[in-house]
Image (cartoon, rainbow, N blue to C red):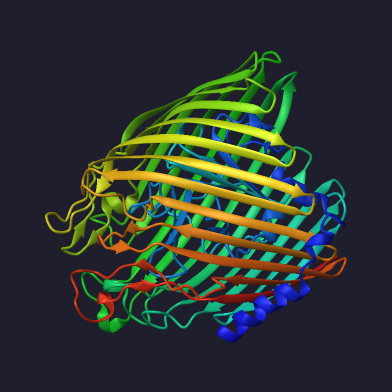
Amino acid sequence: MRIARVLFIIFLFITSFPLSAIGKDVSEEMLLFFEEKELIIETPARHKQKAKESPSSISVITEDNIKKLPARNLAEILETVVGYDVTYNGNVRRSNIAARGLLDTSLTKRVLFLVDGRPANRVGDGIFDIGFETPVNNIERIEIIRGPGSALYGANAFSGVVNIITKPPKEKGSGDIAATYGTGEAKGYDINFNRPIGNIGLYLTASGLHFDNEGIWNENEQVNRESIGLKAVYKDLTLSFGYNDNDKGLPQKGRYAYKDFVSENLAWFLYGDYKFEPAKNLNLDFNLYLNTSDNKLLYSDKVQSAVNQDQLRDERRIGGEVLANYEISDKFTILSGIAARHERFEYNLDLGADERHSTSKAIFLQIEGKIEKGIVTIGTRYDVHSIYGGHTSPRLSFLYNPMDDARLRFAYGNAYRPPEFLEMYGYRGSTRIGNEDLTPEKVNSYEAGIGYTFSKYMDADITMFYNDIEDIIVFNSGTSKYQNSSGTGSTRGIEVELKSRPVKSIHLFANYTFQETHNDYTEDRFAYAPKHKFNLGLTGEYGSSVLTLTAGYKGSRKDTFGNDLEDYMVINGKYIYSIKKNIDLSIIARNIFDKRYVVEGHDPQYTTGINARAYIYEGVSVWLGLRYQF
């Protein structure tokens, strides 16, 4: 692999553009990377607005960004976002995400993931897979809220919201086919096909991936995924269907440390959305969705026990919303809505029942007023749940523009993360028993930010935040086998973003996150919360070539065992060469300089064997891609 790395770097220098000639043949798409604030978005306020008018701290990743970033999956895209941090629990196939230091042991539960506005976190454990399990070939853009979002979205919008917006059908037929081959026996394909039939627009997508790394702890690191999706649009009606068949190995510690321990997951969804305008300045939006997931965690027969049993999960969620957006005048807008959903979770290791059900209902209201040089947003949402009762989530924000190029933002929000079915009813023999009396985690969040656009070539933002967390769901294996809602803690920090276009064909970005966290329960930092994190990126285009280089630094942090993990920096790159107007060759190199770093320390209960080893993340990885557009 050292030879491959050297050849890749030489290849970049030989074929990349001459800096003295920069400024020619610039694609207009690249400008989107640095005109983010002019983009029209919907996630922060649930109606269309310019990104610069958002009541929340946001980041937007466009289709063009995704194409040029040296990222193979959603996790590697999101780790470049300021305030967000991705960690790998056990292996590259299990990626977890935190917003503003709030990961600890919650995996992805404290960030709400939406796909075209549809809630996508799983029913049983609240997780959304951001690794190779989720295809990224049909993403149009990703709208990301940094901070609480429960005032509009309810459960799980605790520290952030990520809305993945997929590509819509186009008026003219088109499509593309792509193939991938790389390190870890990676073989993949992507197919996107757009075809209008009469007044109906159709967009079909299919993708597959086989991945089988050598493994750090054992050889059980394979991924096999097949996905298909269909989106149909007729006037104001959109219907979507998705299917994902994902099998993967789980080479982790403790009960997972077996070569033949695998996860098999089959999931599909249906989604419908209808928008119309019954009266002037009044827009209504109706949506319905059905999410299903059948998940199996399978052990070898020789290790079956009360603790190590096959886990069979069958989960369903059906829900819907009605939203009304009324523009009273050019200065005042009222958004109101109702939501309801029913969830069913069947688990063979449930504590005393074959299946569990829950229902929830919600009502929300938001008032947005434009004053001279500013926008005030006030909103609240009330959710009532059949198991853990009601919760009110208010928010208030003030955006002020003292000058055309300057902006100030102040915001407060309250959000919650509910206990999941596994936390309330899961059973692990004599080691862990669910607690039906758990209550939702709660956070009061405060932030203040300032931004300035120096020119059309440079933009900067600085945001300060503070989060006060209550009723954290904790588990102490040394004193109790029950989880309880007794934890408290706080996080505070500063986020800095800078984007620059010194000349038309070179784009630079840099972001830095400083955060201090404190878990009152452990009297230490929250796990996996580095004090310092920064990203640097450069994208340049000349003629038929595009080159992107990124550097990511992560400071020292604790893992869940209390180990101190050292800081590290990783350099990544992507090169795209247009062989013809409709044929692109790409090379992605992750961890170019083969930096080895620990993502999870050893379990202190063990002094020998697999559980006494730290998990060291994979070294250099090179993936080749070929895409044909028609």
> Picture coordinates of residue 300 (x, y %)?
32, 81
Q: Name the side, left or right, on which 9 lies relative to 265.
A: right
- In the image, residue 175 sits, relative to residue 126, either above or below, namely below
Residue 536, compared with residue 388, is above or below; it is: below
User: Would you identify the image quadrant in which residue 311 lies?
Assistant: bottom left
Q: In the figure, 325 relative to 428: above or below?
A: above
Residue closer to the observer: 27 or 338: 27
Q: In front: 111, or 337?
A: 111
The image shows residue 187 at horizontal and vertical percentages of 62, 78
Which image quarter is the N terminus in? bottom right
Left or right: residue 242 compared with residue 476: right
Q: Residue at x 54, y 33 (%)?
A: 56
Query: How many marks do you count on the picture?
Result: 0
Look at 63% across and 67% down and name the residue there.
573
Screen quadrant of the C terminus:
bottom right
**In x, y percent, where is residue 245?**
55, 68
Q: Is residue 1 at all visible to an observer of this figure?
A: no
The percent coordinates of residue 408 (x first, y second) are 56, 26
235 or 153: which is nearer to us? 153
Of all residues shown, which one is farthest toward the front? 20
Which residue corresponds to the image point at 63% horizontal and 22% vertical from the top-left? 401
Res. 412 in view: yes
570 left or right, relative to 254: right
- The answer to which quarter of the image holds residue 276 is top right
> In the image, what residue occupies the spot 27% across and 84% down?
302
